[in-house]
Image (cartoon, helix red, strand yellow):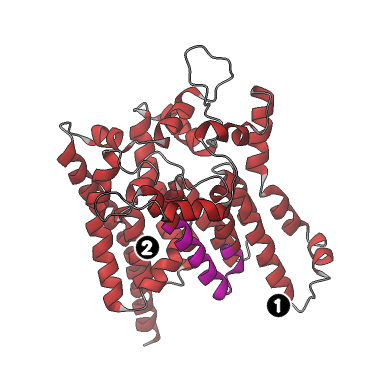
Amino acid sequence: MALEAVVRANASGRLIVVTIAAVPLLFVISGLAIRYAAFASVSEETGFAAYARALCRWDCAWYIGISEQGYERFPIPDHSNVGRWGFFPLYPMLVAAIRSVFPFPTILIATITSIACSYAACLVAWPLLEKNMSAYVLYCAFLLSGPFSFHFTTFLSEPLFVLLTSCVFLALKRSSYLAAGVSSALLSATRLVGVFVVFATVIQMFSEHRRQGGSALSFPHWLLGRPVLLVAVLISPAGLFAYILFLYLTVGDGFAFLHIQRAFGRVAGNPLVFLWDGLSAVPTTGWLPRAPQWSALAAITGLALSAVLAARRQYGAALFCALCIILPLITNLASMVRYVIGLAPLTMMLAVLLSASQLIWLAALVLFLGACYFTTVAWIGGYLALV
């Protein structure tokens, strides 16, 4: 009897592992099919390479330039005076490294790599979602077959950012602080706001200290007495510091990634004013919201979900997500939808909330899959410039 129980347990365990791997794979296939159908409906070209090129919109071109040519050292005749420095280097470097092994077009390699990163992010999300299968299915559908899945399957920073963010929070969940520090360092080399995840690490350490009976005042001494924890904190911003050093040595301005923002129309202002301007940008014809309204609604939704995270005592994730929204919001609303959907703790929380009711879960799943076609057509056509 005991042997039979062990066999059944092993069989059940293998079935769960296969299911966990199969669910995101299913949405990889369905997402590709839906987005390719959208591509075929607006393009006379055929083939995966043409599909990959069609999805490469807006910032994707900047990442291709970095991956193939590196960063500029001005002055360069006949080149744009905007510069590529505002785009962080880790993902373009990864694609360039893969291209050195597989001699295929950059956008083709980047598209496959992005899909692989998004698939891996789904797998990492399983334990973060507390093995909630309903939430897991919805999260995988959102990332790989949802209305914004083109962001996670083309050459943008979102796929790697989501994967590394998930790795950080999984490491913190398991109290693997050194792993969290390494993932944080990579995250800070992927996007500027990635450096904020160090606060989540410190908050988790503080929570562990309090669980052990320590006081708030004794936390600094407790932390200093644990070199591994201290190293984890100190290496978290290493990716950002490495990029600053690179820019200083090559361009002469270590903070060129900040100074170049003016060329993209990003100037510091009142975030509340930006939100109001976005919400009040009502369409002159039709009833569909305009891009500024979508961006403002995305920012408000993201901050609301951050508050939900805080209410559920996920303070580190809440603070990280709020900072990742507020920092770009200080300049304007551009790309705000991208920034919000690229925050893994928020989309996971959304999946959990939508899974509370079976009917709502089913409606959300149908909506995700149904909207994928139309948003992909809009993305390829250039109608989603600000999202």
Could you say which is closer to the camera, residue 178 or residue 332?
A: 332
Could you say which is closer to the camera, residue 163 or residue 352?
A: 352
Residue bearing the label numbered 2: 139
Task: Tell me if residue 49 comes above or below residue 200 in the rendering.
Answer: above
What separation in Å lies between label 2 and label 1 (alpha carbons)? Answer: 31 Å
Q: Amino acid at mark 1?
A: Arg
Residue at the outermost bottom position: 1
Mark identifier at residue 211: 1
Q: Residue at x 58, y 18 (%)?
A: 74
Is residue 133 among the parts visible in the rendering?
A: no
Mark identifier at residue 381: none
Q: Position of residue 157 (x, y in %)?
A: 46, 43
Q: Nearer the viewer, mark 2 or mark 1?
A: 2
Could you say which is closer to the camera, residue 386 or residue 205?
A: 386
Q: Quadrant of residue 40?
A: top left
Does 317 lie within the magenta span?
yes
